Amino acid sequence: MQLFRRSILILPLCLLAACSSEPERPRPIGQAFAGPASLQLRSELGVRSAVVATARHGERLDIIQVRRRFYKVRNAAGAEGWVDGRNLLSTAQMDLIDRVSKQAQSLPSQGKATVYDPLNVHTGPNRQSPTIAQMAPGAYADVVGHKVAPRAAYKPVGTLVPPQPTPPPRKPKKRTSSKSLLPPPPAPAPPANWLDLSKSSLPPEPEPSAGAEPEAPKPLPRDDWSLVRLADGKAGWVLTRMLVMGIPDEVAQYAEGHRITSYFALGEVDAGGQKKRHYLWTTLSKTLEPYEFDSFRVFIYNARRSRYETAYIERNLRGYFPVVTGSVEVREGKETLTVPSFTVIVEDKDGQLVRKTFSFQLYRVRMVSKTPVGRDQIGGQSAAGPPGPGGESNGGSLAREVEEKVKKLFR
């Protein structure tokens, strides 16, 4: 009797468990991270299909199915949807983004830039590389590097789905039919004039001219890219032509159609109760150049005339980042004064790199030092700047070490 009662109690529990059981979900075959700031997971492959969930940049996703370049992923909440594989980041790419963002914190800014339209920030200097953020119109970012890159096909770093083990080949089934198979009949012989028929159907081949060289492949188009540091600390690559440097318009109007690549404030003056800054800028007259500027210029604000005037200018040169501002000690009679300064790296007449340090004092610009530098100290904020008030340089070995790592990452 007791056994019968227990059976009656257990039977409903078993039926309830059977009714609540869900189909087993597919196991993940890989792992990825959302690349864009907002990634939509859709129910089907079509771009008009319903959105089932939204993933934020860096959110971990499990890959459960692959169809060509599209991936079906599942987020932590269990929502499953399809995304374009170009918007996914591998573990290696996430590590690279974190390292570049940390290293970019120590690179000196070459000026702040803004955009007029939304601009994607990419993981690398490639239009097809994933985007990690988007600059909104009016937002500002620090420009810290520059690179000219070809429009080559994007090659992702790392793999999203590890190679799956191949199953062992199946053994062919043995034929159990007792009927013997007849051999196939022999192929028909070609017609006797098959050579003439072939020549008449094919167009005549052009005869190569004597001494003609094969055409060289056309070079890939290239783009100017800028490495920017966003307000939240992330760093990525954007198209340089989309950036607008944040120097005031009353100074930018003197650019003469050249692109302003960097700018710095060198002090300020009181103009009728309004503070006006003096500026240093660098400009480039052409695009797709391996250097960052071919001219630099110092503007001072003339309070008496209420306008900006040129205090110093150099043209027709090849200059490289970083341009660094600081301070330097100068002799003024019997006194030693600490005045603003700036440092530029340019090529001399022999093609050798030199670092020139200029002092800025009472609207006068004067070169105070000139030292040779190596090629390993250009192209991304690696050189040390002029001595600061505490006797330490603005840059130094730490910045050079960081730059070497950045170069290796993006080669």
Image: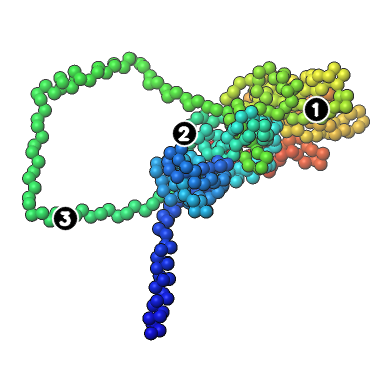
The kind of residue tagged 2 is: Ala
Quadrant assignment, res 105: top right
Quadrant of the image occupied by residue 300: top right
Q: Secondary structure at mark 3?
A: loop
The residue that appears at 47% across and 49% down in the rendered structure is: 80
**The label number, if any, that marks residue 174 in the structure image:** 3
Furthest toward the right, the residue is 334
Task: Say whether disc 2 or disc 3 marks the residue closer to the N-terminus.
Answer: 2
Give the label on residue 153, or none. 2
Q: Which mark is residue 49?
A: none
Query: Marks 3 and 2: in contact by CB < 8 Å?
Result: no
Question: What residue is drawn where x is 19% and y is 18%?
Answer: 200
Give the CA separation, mark 2 to mark 3: 48 Å
Question: Can you give x and y, in whole percent of width and height, for residue 262 in the image?
Answer: 69, 28
The three-letter code of the residue at mark 1 reads Arg
Instruction: Give the camera-side residue of 142 and 144.
Output: 142
Q: Position of residue 2 (x, y in %)?
A: 40, 84
Q: Is residue 366 above or below residue 38?
A: above
Characterize the local packing of mark 3: few (<14), some (14-19) or many (20 or more) Cα atoms within 10 angstroms. Answer: few
Q: Amino acid at mark 3?
A: Lys
Which of the marked residues, 2 or 1, is nearer the chain's N terminus? 2
- Which residue occupies 31% across, 17% down? 208
Quarter of the figure that contains the N terminus: bottom left
What residue lies at 62% left-to-right and 35% top-to-bottom? 135
The reply to whether residue 360 is visible in this rendering is no
Q: What residue is disc 1 on?
A: 277
The Cα–Cα distance between marks 2 and 1, rounded to whole angstroms, is 45 Å
Q: Earlier in the sequence, mark 3 or mark 1?
A: 3
Query: In the image, 177: left or right of 13?
Result: left
Name the side, left or right, on which 180 lies relative to 307. Answer: left
